[in-house]
Image: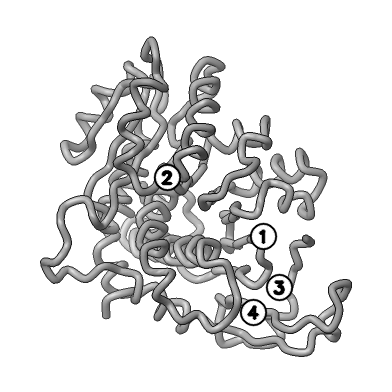
């Protein structure tokens, strides 16, 4: 299946919305490749997307028990990189997840624990039998993020490769970022036969490295039907196996791209993904679409809009001095502004 590019058509169709979710229906022939050959083309704008997101957010009405709103796992954290898993974990919590478990190497554990007592830290990636040690914890998790602060140690990569296979077997949704993307680029077959949702969050360089490995954008579909890709950049852009679910988000953000912003995004996506998957069967989407892919697209948009808004708010206060820690302080007010007012 070819991933179609409607960016120019979208810009001409509606200049009122910088973000659009495109729905293509009723092909006159399976071989059609041009806009004029579609009998029907409908657009769901930003307002409708946000309405769906609001329907997925669990109410704070006292009916949920601890853990029900999200138990997120983060696989990452090494001697050199301890901030990234913290950023991913704390953003998942700040968005609204109840619990976050971080699986890291031993040298990273004490440092990550010192950042926040809310994070549950397991120094197991370099254990004698890491898969056996980590496996019992997976049963408790709704979504797993792989990559923040992982590093590129060959032994760690071997452990994570086996862990991905186990996650596939247990059908746990997966978000892959940073060094996790490097691992996938080196071995795309790790994602073969996944039935649960997978979201990749490459920046421009990581995306180019991936498509070069896959011989162009059309090769992205070979990663599997469950894979959704959120390309980060001046505009965040979503690629899906279902071309109906593509969108671009240019709102928010700033000229300041501080380290850790991508980790905030991946953690936020994880929480929104859990919520969207729980709610997707109840949503009246209005078209024939895979509910898990729709949930992936929805969660990526929700997190993209949120983190870019945090960026712009923090930049207004700190300018060039803005750090990812400044962005964290705006998660609450950005969330309120976008999804609860």
- Mark 2 and mark 4 lie on one chain; the one further toward the N terminus is 4
- Mark 4 and mark 1 lie on one chain; the one further toward the N terminus is 4
Q: Secondary structure at mark 1?
A: loop
Residue 208 falls in image quadrant = top right
The picture places residue 137, in percent across and down from the top left corner, at 31, 33
Quickly name the residue at label 2.
263
Rendered residue at 84%/73% (across/down): 30
Q: Are marks 2 and 4 in contact (CB under 8 Å)?
A: no
Please give the label number shown on residue 19.
Answer: none
Q: CA distance from mark 3 to mark 4?
A: 13 Å
Q: CA distance from mark 4 to mark 1?
A: 13 Å
The picture places residue 96, in percent across and down from the top left corner, at 26, 58
The nearer-to-camera label among 2 and 4 is 4
- Is 45 left, or right, of 50 in this rendering? right
Note whether residue 258 is visible: no
Q: Secondary structure at mark 3?
A: helix
Residue furthest out toward the front? 169
Q: Quadrant of the C terminus?
A: bottom left
Quickly name the residue at label 1.
241
Q: CA distance from mark 3 to mark 2?
A: 27 Å
Q: Residues within 10 Å of mark 3 (few under 14, many from 20)?
A: some
The nearer-to-camera label among 1 and 3 is 1
Q: Residues within 10 Å of mark 1 (few under 14, many from 20)?
A: many
Q: Quadrant of the N terminus?
A: bottom right
Q: CA distance from mark 2 to mark 1?
A: 24 Å
Q: CA distance from mark 2 to mark 4?
A: 30 Å
Q: Secondary structure at mark 2?
A: helix
**Residue closer to the observer: 52 or 267:** 52
The nearer-to-camera label among 3 and 4 is 4
Q: In the rendered image of this protein, does residue 269 appear above or below residue 184?
A: below
């Amino acid at each position: 299946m070819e991933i179609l590019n409607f960016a120019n058509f979208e810009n001409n169709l509606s200049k009122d919305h910088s973000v659009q979710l495109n729905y293509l229906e009723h092909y006159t022939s399976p071989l059609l490749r041009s806009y004029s050959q579609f009998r029907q083309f409908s657009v769901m704008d930003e307002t409708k997307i946000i309405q769906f997101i609001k329907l997925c957010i669990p109410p704070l009405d006292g009916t949920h028990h601890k853990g029900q709103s999200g138990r997120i796992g983060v696989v990452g954290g090494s001697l050199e990189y301890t901030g990234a898993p913290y950023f991913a974990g704390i953003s998942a919590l700040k968005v609204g997840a109840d619990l976050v478990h971080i699986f890291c190497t031993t040298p990273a554990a004490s440092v990550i624990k010192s950042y926040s007592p809310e994070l549950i830290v397991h120094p197991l990636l370099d254990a004698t039998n890491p898969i056996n040690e980590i496996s019992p914890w997976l049963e408790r998790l709704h979504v797993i993020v792989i990559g923040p602060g992982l590093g590129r140690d060959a032994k760690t990569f071997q452990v994570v490769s086996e862990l991905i296979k186990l996650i596939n077997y247990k059908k746990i949704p997966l978000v892959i970022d940073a060094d996790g993307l490097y691992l996938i680029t080196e071995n795309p077959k790790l994602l073969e036969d996944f039935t649960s949702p997978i979201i990749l969050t490459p920046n421009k360089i990581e995306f180019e490295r991936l498509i070069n490995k896959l011989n162009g954008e059309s090769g992205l579909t070979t990663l599997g039907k469950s894979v959704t890709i959120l390309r980060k950049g001046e505009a965040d852009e979503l690629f899906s196996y279902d071309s109906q679910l593509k969108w671009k988000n240019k709102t928010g953000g700033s000229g300041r791209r501080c380290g850790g912003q991508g980790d905030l995004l991946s953690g936020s996506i994880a929480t929104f993904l859990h919520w969207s998957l729980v709610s997707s069967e109840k949503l009246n989407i209005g078209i024939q679409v895979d509910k898990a892919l729709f949930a992936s697209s929805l969660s990526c948009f929700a997190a993209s809009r949120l983190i870019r808004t945090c960026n712009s708010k923090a930049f207004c206060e700190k300018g060039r001095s803005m750090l990812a820690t400044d962005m964290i302080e705006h998660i609450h007010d950005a969330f309120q502004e976008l999804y609860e007012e």
